[in-house]
Amino acid sequence: MRLIVKSGGPQAYEEWRSLFAEVSPGIDVLDWFDPPADLRGIEYALVWAPEAGRLAELPDLKLIVSSGAGVDHILADPQLPGHLPIARMMLDVTAVEMSEYVLMSALMLVRDMKRMIVNQANRHWEDFFPPLRSTATRVGIMGLGSLGAAAADLLRRTGFMVSGWSRRRADLPGVRCHAGEAEFDAFLAETDILVCLLPATEATRGILNARTFARLPRGACLVNAARGSHMVQADLLAALDSGQLRQAVLDVFEPEPLDADSPLWTHPGVIVTPHIASTPSRRDRAVRAAELIDLHRRGEPLPNLYDRATGY
Ligand code: NDP
Ligand code: OXD
């Protein structure tokens, strides 16, 4: 069976080929950047940000596997064949790594790690009390799916007070769960560190905006590990400059890579990380893609399918 791969750039192809040769030798792995003349018989595609129109050129395509957990980079293609299933790359390690990233960010914000890193660069010894204490800090997580729920659990077990917000009401031990637009403001009002783990949809685009920031307690912090499209950058900078927000840890941007002259790089209240909150290895992804292809061939249900009705 034929699988075409676009993930990690042209230089990643050889690695994908040898990984699939190991985990599922029956799969013939084709290079998206050097495709065969005959595109017939390509039933599977493993992709990150495929160029518009390319998937539609594959006449026998049956399943699209996203190389990441999100699918917005695939849905951005206006010619995407609407009938094809899209499987999200969701591994146990995806949730573990994301939870660690969120915990790390929360601890950095609680201790003001940014200030210490800047002080070190300036050889400045400054003794100060941390601005927050973990056990007295309320972390509010937007999105309580595979990643939000796992992050909530780790934060709670570390001693943070955790609440969450989702479309339908979740039921998570030790987490105050809010649901829907009607409960959004109440959720924000009790949040010292706001964590965004929402999928990118029409409804969530620009949700990290001036209105949202204004409803947080003054001096609150933000962690965005979901998508750059959630954030209105000008509103974030204004909220940081006015003191409404104290600090932000940002892993995702629009566009990526973050522009070299973006003010976010040098803003004293911002910590930038390069979309690395959760990065399963290519080996892990090849194993999961091979499992998904196998399930699909056997006509069995696939886990973590993109749902066209909800948009995520
Ligand atoms: P899921 O689909 O499992 O969960 C999404 C959550 O968001 C659900 O709780 C859902 O509510 C909630 N939600 C969706 N729309 C709304 C809305 N309009 N209002 C309120 N809540 C809403 O997603 P994952 O947890 O797997 O992943 C989340 C995102 O994280 C991905 O889409 C991706 O963009 C990003 N990501 C980032 C990575 C990184 O390295 N930075 C790595 C992996 C993922 P409900 O429970 O009611 O359905
Ligand atoms: C993502 C990922 O969807 O890295 O952002 O998995």
Image (cartoon, grey):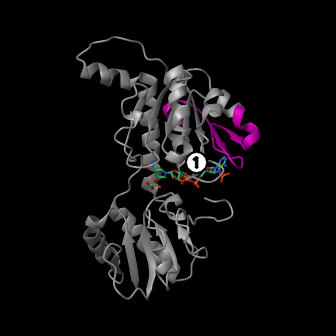
Task: Tell me, yes or no, whether the highlighted magenta stretch contains residue 173.
Answer: yes
Task: Tell me, yes or no, whether the highlighted magenta stretch contains residue 118.
Answer: no
**Crowd around label 1: few <14 · some 14–19 · many ≥20 (10 Å):** many
Give the residue number, with chain letter if any, for mark 1: 198
Can you name the residue that lies furthest to the left here?
123
Q: Which residues are magenta?
A: 156-185
The image quadrant of residue 118 is top left
The image quadrant of residue 215 is top right
Q: Would residue 240 appear left or right of 217 to someone viewing this image? A: left
Give the residue type that dot 1 points to: Leu
- Which is more toward the observer, 74 or 194? 74
Q: Quadrant where the C terminus lies?
A: bottom right
**How far across and down, in percent of the image, does residue 201 sit?**
61, 54
Position above or below: 73 against 275: below
Q: Residue at x 70, y 37 (%)?
A: 184
Does mark 1's beta carbon lie closer than 8 Å to ligand 1? yes
Q: Residue at x 54, y 69 (%)?
A: 86
**How far across and down, in percent of the image, does residue 290 sit?**
41, 74
Q: Secondary structure at mark 1?
A: loop
- Which is more toward the observer, 241 or 96? 241
Q: Would residue 142 appear left or right of 151 to someone viewing this image? A: right
The image quadrant of residue 286 is bottom left
Disc tally is 1
**How far across and down, in percent of the image, does residue 41 sit?**
43, 88
Position above or below: 44 against 263: below
Q: Residue at x 35, y 78 (%)?
A: 24
Q: Residue at x 42, y 22 (%)?
A: 111
Please state the quadrant of the image where ligand 2 appears.
Answer: bottom left
- Which is more toward the observer, 231 or 46? 231
